Amino acid sequence: MTEAVVGPVLIVGSGLLGASIGLALRRAGVTTYLEDTDAESVRIAVERGAGETGLAGDPRVVVVAVPPDVAGAVMADASRRFPSATITDVTSVKADPLASAAALGADMGRVVGGHPLAGREVSGPAGARADLFDDRVWVVAPLPGGDPERAADVVALARTCGGVPVVMSAADHDRAVAVTSHAPQVLSSLLAARLLEVDDEAVAVSGQGLRDMTRIADSDPVLWRAILAANAERVADVLTALAEDLQRVVADLRERGSGRDGTSATLEVLERGASGRQRIPGKHGTGATDFAVVSVMVADEPGQVASVLVAMGELGVNLEDIRIEHVLGRPSGLIDISVRPGAVGVLEAGLRERGFDVRS
Amino acid sequence: MTEAVVGPVLIVGSGLLGASIGLALRRAGVTTYLEDTDAESVRIAVERGAGETGLAGDPRVVVVAVPPDVAGAVMADASRRFPSATITDVTSVKADPLASAAALGADMGRVVGGHPLAGREVSGPAGARADLFDDRVWVVAPLPGGDPERAADVVALARTCGGVPVVMSAADHDRAVAVTSHAPQVLSSLLAARLLEVDDEAVAVSGQGLRDMTRIADSDPVLWRAILAANAERVADVLTALAEDLQRVVADLRERGSGRDGTSATLEVLERGASGRQRIPGKHGTGATDFAVVSVMVADEPGQVASVLVAMGELGVNLEDIRIEHVLGRPSGLIDISVRPGAVGVLEAGLRERGFDVRS
């Protein structure tokens, strides 16, 4: 496997992702060229230092950084224009665009799917950043029977951009994101939609759980409609399995409501959920339950949370995660600090010694 | 309305909530007595300073702090034993236990439902804390036609314990928590259960969204079965409405998968979700979208997050919320800092001046 991608790299599509790839590659000394149907977008990306225009000859790699609904056509076009280049894309769904490229006559021996798991709230080249992909998973999806050297090019591209390449098939990728990203998005929206059916008083009786569960419902509906449409069957499969469990819980609760006993299906779903949750990797690939939580009550004034973290630094305890619980009424707050279990004793004693209101 | 509750207060059930109420009331100078069928539990609670045993005569208030399935019977019993006391409970469902108390002959003119929205991961009097209810909503649910003086007693009790009393009917309470707490719990479990159906590689392609959406799936299945059973009909109503939306999305996606166009139902659900999310109050009752996010990349070493927050303190910018994005591979991390929108300019400039890697 190559350590760094060999240029020149042509990036077709100079939006947020395309321009960021340009910046990341330039940071590593790779020569990049840019194209976009929008001349203004290219102008901004060039001005930002993401690459140049006027490529002559074949690039080593073409990165197609356009929306999923046109990615296949642009890959097929690139395949015709550049007969020796490796061609990849960056869309968040893989099978659909690749099938579309094949149907439109792309030389699929040179095409490798790609999906960097990175993004920003903003779009366009003005928001591009050289470090957008640093430490992010970058899925590389080679096609069955494809040239391993082409896959190696895309692995090198991902690594050169600062990403962590993870090789999997397009189908495996799409099944994975259907569960880990697309179905959660739909569920979050479905739950948040219920809040339109209750009054203000009811919404006031809400805690951190509801807040966490509806955070991603705040995403762009039009963008998400396109993503879900491009992975429709796989998302529908996950949601169908989920709907079956949901129906069992509803039937179970209705039976209970009618006076009869029996919430065994509900219990079973809750138990499976607790088991499934254990599978999510924590920071740096450690298990989700590897950390212990220490709670501290702090005043809601500038510098209060900072002073706790400064004390942690003095104690040599690393912060794995932090949550601020939002409470109503009085200006104060409880913060939950996740640390390695072995550090709890030192941390609690050290914080108490410094006068902090440790709650656990 | 009384400012502080008048004692003595008898707490029946000396577990986590009962003992914590004892500690909170004693903190405020109120005389408390404890009872429990478990002598060892009472002994620990008394030792912790939550109250005394050996009450003579009628208490002013009896707080029934036992599980939902026995709360009704214990309230009815308290009503017979103490003919002048105000009687309340602390269970997370209201209509069921109150109906059960009435059916068992409790003097309902003196009974007022209660639900402090507070808890800990641990149970039992050893984990009790005087400040468990500080700044937490404490729902007070008077019965139709009940004595307003009795409701005032429970409002005073909540306030004396440090809580924020919110008066609503038992039915309104149960409908509210069905949406804001019980349905989210079921959905989180349903989603997390899907993770049992995919391989390790797929789970590795997961981000913060999935982590947030499955956090509460890590709760105690047996406890949650009991809570859901006690609010079965109302939770089933919410889940039924949600299942209808879900079926529409699935049908929509299947149609799309079959080659035809049309993801308008999906779009509509996503749009309703985004609207619903806007209804969740943020910290101190402000809207959820009132804060702006500034992202900073920090090294994964003790004190790195602290140094950012110290700089915020120096800049006089208050931290409204903080999130650490978990990335794979290399030891570094992106933190998202929520602040009031007016503070973004000062914060970004100040952090950059101090050499921080600001991303937004």
Image (cartoon, coloured by chain):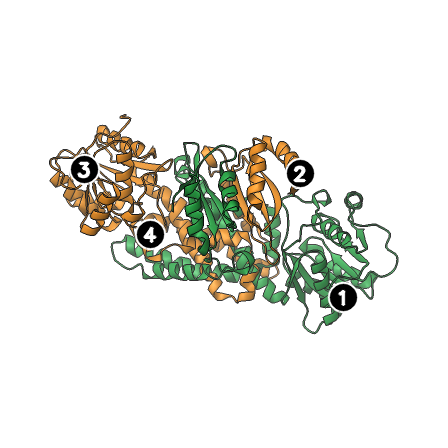
Chain colours: A orange, B green
Residue B181: which quarter of the image?
Answer: bottom right
Residue positioned 64% across, 32% down in the render:
A345
- Marks 4 and 2, how far apart at CA: 50 Å
Q: Mark 3 or mark 1: which is in front?
A: 3
Tags 3 and 1 touching, CB below 8 Å: no
> In this figure, which residue is indicated by the disc labeled 1?
B105
Q: Earlier in the sequence, mark 3 or mark 2?
A: 3
Task: Name the residue nearer the viewer: B67 or B59.
Answer: B59
| Residue A126 x/y as whole percent | 29, 48
Q: CA distance from mark 3 to mark 1?
A: 78 Å
Residue B296 visible in the current orientation = no
Judge from the rendering whether residue A200 lies leftward or rightward of residue B243; answer left or right. right
The residue under label 4 is A228
Screen quadrant of the N terminus of chain B: bottom right
Q: CA distance from mark 4 to mark 1?
A: 55 Å
Q: Residues within 10 Å of mark 2 (few under 14, many from 20)?
A: few
